[in-house]
Image (tube, rainbow, N blue to C red):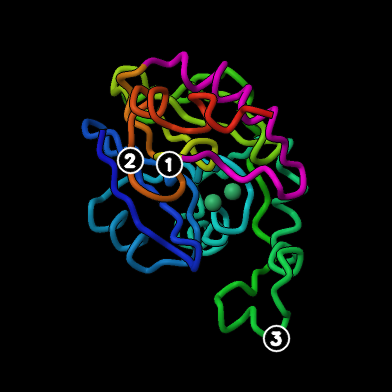
Amino acid sequence: MIIETFILSLFQQNTRVVACEKTGKAVCIDPGEDSPELVEYIRSNGYDLQAITLTHAHLDHIGGVGALKREFPDAEIILHADDDVLYQNLPQQPLRMGLPPEQLSALGLDYDVPPPITRYWTDGEEYAVGELVFKVLHCPGHTPGHVIFAEMKEQAVFAGDCLFAGSIGRTDLPGGSYEQLIDSINNKILPLGDGLTVYSGHGPDTTIGRERQTNPFLTGMYDLG
Ligand SMILES: [Zn+2]
Ligand SMILES: [Zn+2]
């Protein structure tokens, strides 16, 4: 498995290209903004981009879907249906964050409506990329339709904004729920096993074991009330 990370947008989001070494099949997980470097990387390596696979539909994870789809029109766009409203409302998301409309263009946050979703994730489905197989797990809490992608042979999980090194995703945004997020982490992510490397939507990589032992949201330190 080849993983290339591009840190994109004002929000320092980890956009990733994940490719099967043997077949050259690839996906882009969460293209955060229009990026010529991202397109050039996929083209110069000769990857067959089969899909844009989305963990959730916050603007910093889908801002680059339109541009990437224009470059690779055959790539599917796959999202969980519970984030469809967020996805359709991409142009309004920056305003709901309280950003002034006249500044959006300067910040690179003046979005068009993104292209149509090709299909929706099913909780528990297995999604193949060449010889890689990703287990897709619905992990609501940060958003209603957040999913993660676990490749068990490669011992890797792409966790989006559920779990970060030393922290967890925000739950104060519309559709967020702290109880749901903790439940998703405890019952969907941690059981994957301590050995998995966690590739998060922001910040450095970590492992499930390290987070289980030291993440203050999981050790009970923030769970006193
Ligand atoms: Zn998010
Ligand atoms: Zn994010």
Name the quarter where the N terminus is drawn: top left
Numbered mark located on residue 200 in the image: 1
Reply above or below: 106 against 21.
Answer: below
Corner quadrant of residue 12: bottom left
- Could you classify mark 1 by the number of other residues whose Cα lies within 10 Å: few (under 14), some (14-19), or many (20 or more)? many
Q: Position of residue 161 (x, y in %)?
A: 53, 42
Tag 3 secondary structure: helix
- Check if mark 2's residue and mark 3's residue have beta carbons within 8 Å: no
Label 2 CB-ligand 2 distance < 8 A: no
Q: CA distance from mark 2 to mark 3?
A: 35 Å
> Residue drawn 72% across and 41% down?
176
> Residue drawn 64% across and 40% down?
142
The part of the chain drawn in magenta is: 167-193
> Tag count in the figure?
3
Name the quarter where the C terminus is drawn: top right
Q: What residue is pinned by disc 2?
A: 205
Three-letter residue code for mark 2: Asp
Three-letter residue code for mark 3: Glu
Q: What residue is pinned by disc 3?
A: 102
Label 1 CB-ligand 2 distance < 8 A: no
Q: Earlier in the sequence, mark 2 or mark 3?
A: 3
Q: Earlier in the sequence, mark 3 or mark 1?
A: 3
- Check if mark 2's residue and mark 1's residue have beta carbons within 8 Å: yes
Out of 120 and 98, give the one closest to the viewer. 98
Corner quadrant of residue 169: top right
Out of 66 and 7, give the one closest to the viewer. 7
